């Protein structure tokens, strides 16, 4: 048979064309697409970088201190981050980060985010995404920070006077001219016991006992952490070879890094009539204008009895009792007659019972709102005490109770008691 060469040539040509790739066979290569959010510059990475983010929550960071809140590591260098926060200062490797949007810097595989703030409060920082090459990678990692006030002890300064205005000092003993008020009373030992008051539990706990020095101006100072305190001052010296303690219990508040200045009277305690009698005999034997060793009668005020309450945190539950002591110090005995102490409710509408005790004996009782009671209080030479006991409160609230002492140096006294459920 005769072969048609034109047809054979066409067949070979068709086969060659088909073998050159014109027909849709599967590709053996792989193409990676970006995992970015559309903000990339159009480039594609062959593999997604391995990014690790660790966060540290801080519940008691100090104000103005930079704290580490986030560590970011990557196997490829990061050139920018996107964080969001409302206030404070976020830095990434010492570069201040924008509050929203991207922040660029020299590319680095290790990043540290720090946070600081000028004001105490609660803050939140979110790392939205990081940028590697031209591609942004979502993170959505948040960290919470609570900034607290930096606790700095407060400076406390007290100037303490005795009953006639003589200043307490620890400099050196000096003689004094009889008939003249001494400038200072030297004490051999001087200290303060500080008790911190806890409002939540209504308790006092001793936090420190400090030895004090006082200069010729009667000034003594020390430091305490912020809080509410009762401070018990004790200044001790000998009279007739007997130790006499001058004491003050005062309530005060110490503020954070604050300065506090107080002027207070400090009173002799537990001085017997016998010691006062011997001191008076020595004093009377000295001629006016002569120098003499310090004597209790050099401290005699214009009136012969001085009375006071010690400060306290008078907080009591409605079914409990609270007691306070009314102290007096006298340079002569006073026989009492009529209208010496008049007790009455003033501004309080809360019914309660008020009992007076002297020694072991109850000497008076007041148990109705707006009632008054007269008590003839006997002042002996030296130290005196009268105890008030408050109980059977009808309801919660603030009780303001006052009374008048017709013989004491101060004649108006008021106590406030907080009554709670």
Image (spheres, rainbow, N blue to C red):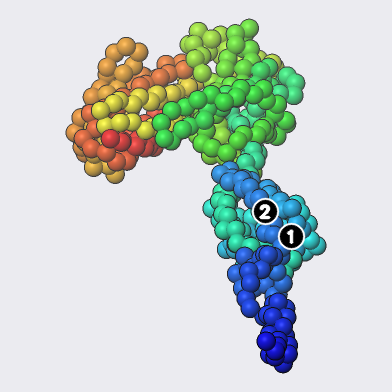
Position of the N terminus, as image quadrant, is bottom right
The numbered disc on residue 51 is 2
Residue 389 in percent (x, y) is at 31, 24
Q: In this orientation, which residue lies closer to the viewer: 118 or 203?
A: 118
In this image, 59 relative to 368: left or right?
Answer: right
The numbered disc on residue 78 is 1
Q: Residue furthest bottom?
A: 6
Residue at the spot 60% in from the left edge and 8% down from the top edge: 242
Residue 300 in percent (x, y) is at 56, 25
Q: How many marks?
A: 2
Residue at the spot 63% in from the left edge and 12% down from the top edge: 238
Residue 264 in percent (x, y) is at 56, 34
Q: Eyeballing the image, is 347 above or below 205?
A: below
Residue at the spot 35% in from the left edge and 35% down from the top edge: 417
Whether the residues at callouts 2 and 1 have beta carbons within 8 Å, the answer is yes
Q: In this orientation, which residue lies closer to the viewer: 202 or 342?
A: 202
Residue 260: quadrant of the picture: top right
């Amino acid at each position: 048979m005769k072969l048609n060469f034109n047809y054979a040539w066409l067949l070979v040509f068709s086969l060659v064309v088909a073998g050159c790739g014109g027909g849709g066979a599967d590709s053996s290569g792989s193409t990676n697409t970006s995992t970015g959010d559309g903000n990339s510059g159009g480039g594609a990475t062959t593999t997604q970088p391995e990014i690790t983010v660790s966060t540290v929550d801080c519940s008691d960071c100090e104000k103005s201190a930079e704290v580490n809140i986030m560590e970011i590591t990557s196997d490829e260098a990061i050139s920018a981050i996107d964080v969001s926060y409302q206030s404070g200062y976020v830095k990434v490797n010492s570069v201040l980060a924008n509050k929203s949007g991207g922040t660029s810097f020299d590319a680095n595989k290790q990043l540290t985010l720090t946070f600081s703030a000028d004001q105490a409060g609660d803050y939140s920082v979110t790392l939205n995404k990081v940028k590697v090459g031209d591609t942004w990678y979502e993170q959505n990692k948040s960290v919470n920070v609570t900034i607290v006030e930096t606790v700095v002890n407060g400076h406390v300064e007290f100037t303490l006077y005795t009953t006639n205005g003589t200043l307490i000092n620890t400099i050196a003993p000096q003689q004094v001219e009889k008939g003249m008020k001494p400038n200072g009373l030297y004490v051999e030992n001087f200290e303060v016991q500080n008790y911190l008051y806890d409002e939540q539990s209504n308790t006092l706990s001793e936090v420190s006992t400090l030895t004090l020095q006082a200069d010729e101006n009667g000034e003594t100072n020390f430091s305490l952490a912020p809080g509410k305190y009762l401070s018990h001052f004790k200044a001790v010296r000998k009279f007739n070879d007997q130790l006499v303690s001058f004491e003050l219990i005062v309530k005060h508040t110490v503020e954070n890094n604050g300065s506090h200045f107080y002027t207070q009277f400090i009173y002799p305690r537990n001085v017997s009539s016998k010691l006062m009698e011997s001191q008076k005999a020595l004093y009377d034997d000295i001629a006016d204008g002569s120098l003499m060793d310090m004597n209790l009668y050099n401290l005699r005020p214009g009136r012969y009895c001085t009375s006071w309450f010690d400060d306290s945190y008078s907080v009591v539950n409605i079914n409990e009792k609270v007691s306070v002591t009314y102290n007096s110090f006298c340079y002569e005995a006073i026989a009492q007659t009529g209208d010496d102490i008049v007790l009455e409710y003033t501004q309080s509408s809360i019914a309660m019972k008020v009992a007076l005790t002297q020694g072991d004996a109850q000497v008076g009782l007041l148990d109705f709102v707006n009632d008054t009671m007269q008590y003839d209080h006997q002042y002996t030479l030296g130290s005196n005490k009268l105890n008030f006991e408050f109980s059977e409160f009808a309801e919660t609230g603030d009780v303001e109770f006052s009374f008048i002492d017709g013989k004491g140096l101060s004649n108006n006294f008021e106590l406030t008691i907080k009554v709670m459920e």
